[in-house]
Image (cartoon, rainbow, N blue to C red):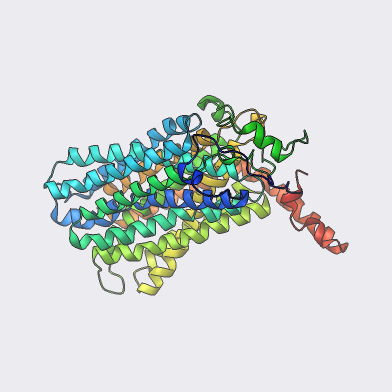
Amino acid sequence: MTKPPAPAMHSPERADGPPGLRALPALSYDTHRALVLGLTFLAYALYHASRKPPSIVKRELARAWPPFADPALLGATDVAFLTSYSLGMFVAGHLGDRLDLRRFLAFGMATSGAAVALFGAGYFLGLHSLAFYVAAQVIAGLLQSTGWPSVVAIVGNWFCGRRRGLIMGVWNAHTSVGNITGSLVAAAMLGYGWGWSFVVPGGLIALGGALVLLFLAPYPQYVGFGPAPIEPVAEESTDGEDSSSSAASGVGKDRRDAVGILKALAIPGVVIFALCLFFAKLVAYTFLYWLPFYLSQTAIGGEHMSAASAGYLSVLFDVGGIIGGILAGFISDQLNARATTAAVFMYLAIPSLFLFHAYGSISKATNIGLMMISGLFVNGPYALITTAVSADLGTHKSLKGDSRALATVTAIIDGTGSLGAALGPFLTGFISRRGWDSVFVMLALCAFVAAVLLSSHVKIEIPQIIEKWRNRSTNMRNGNEDSDVQPLLVEES
């Protein structure tokens, strides 16, 4: 499949396009795509960074800030955030397919920053009301739901084709980069008072929103280009229209017709992957919210560490997650098997979780190694489903090319997953009273269910994988090694 050339000339930009870009010289198509990747990466990294403070300050709150002496109450604030986040996701996805994504995303980032800072304001105001902190988390969850459907839809508008898994796997490192940054910032601010651990990340995401408003082009048409000059996953163009004419005809259009939630649910695979993500995200978010607390409660090498040190150490779980997301995307591209890749990773997560719990206390080196392996297998499928799978399904061939459902499909899948993300930390607050053994049994069971849910898709993919590699072996024996080097790139030619 030959990639069509990008437009040679820069068409006039929309009057309502990004004001920062209008002040710059004309940029090439590839430069715009790089800018979109960079800005959406930064935006969602800041979203995740602003979610880390609760996990970092848990021990400090439990030690000296009533009413949080009971871990179950800490879990209540987590579930308040994640429940409102998951419910808000369905609304945000529906709006994202209908509103200007640049303004919608910038609004979400600015108001999310204010909501995160609101929780920290409780420290400065000396508030000890559980209702205040639960309300702050509910508001934050609703506002943070604007982020994920928006960034996935924007990247999907600019990047299509069969390398989507690898591209989005690398891009999805923003989740772990944000977690790492948020952990480091919140831990560093903890010494000045736990309120600053919220105020500073809140300010950073608000500043990021200003950059999005000034420089992010959510659609190629906004900066004088037509649809991305790569054949879409759903269907390829057959009318011979070149990119320049597409640009000219598309400048006045924001996007194709959006679809409703019911039609998006009817797309094959959406429900199954959404249910899988429910359990996969339950495991991932339990680590996100409780890992620093778990580390601070565990004697590693015979010594307990401070809350700040546990926060710093916990970032290595996300380092493993970065590797896992990239690896899962690459493997799924090569095998053309998203479900099989995700299922294998979830099955391998089960022994890695038990090994981390059983042997992670031997020494810090052992803890680091097993934690990173756990992060790789836990976050790999979570990243794959929320990025490449969601983007693939949002441009599914059943839509017949006449509508787009990227934000809506993304919201359905990640919104369902976020219900699991709300349940995991909430249950952990209660189950941890019986000991951490019970918590890890729960996580292993959830990983198993996530993998089993994909069985019907795996059964379809495995024969295709076997056939694909048989064909490759035959070609190599016949001395035709190059004919199938990139089979996934020529499959739809």
Report x, y in % for residue 26: 58, 48
Q: Is residue 92 above or below residue 186?
A: above
Foreground residue among 436 and 343: 343
Foreground residue among 470 and 392: 392
Figure quadrant of the C terminus: top right
In the image: residue 448, left or right of residue 81? right
In the rendered image, the residue lying farthest to the left is 126
Report x, y in % for residue 43: 43, 48
Report x, y in % for residue 331: 62, 56
In the image: residue 162, left or right of residue 260? right
User: What residue sits 61% from the left and 56% below the top?
Assistant: 330
Q: Is residue 236 above or below residue 169?
A: above
Report x, y in % for residue 28: 61, 50
Residue 66 makes an appearance in the image: no
Foreground residue among 144 and 213: 213
Residue 375 makes an appearance in the image: yes
Q: Is residue 47 above or below residue 410?
A: below
Which quadrant of the structure image shows residue 200?
Answer: bottom left
User: What residue sits 45% from the left and 30% below the top?
Assistant: 95
User: What residue sits 80% from the left and 54% below the top?
Assistant: 471
User: What residue sits 20% from the left and 55% below the top?
Assistant: 194
In the image: residue 483, left or right of residue 37? right
Report the number of discs. 0
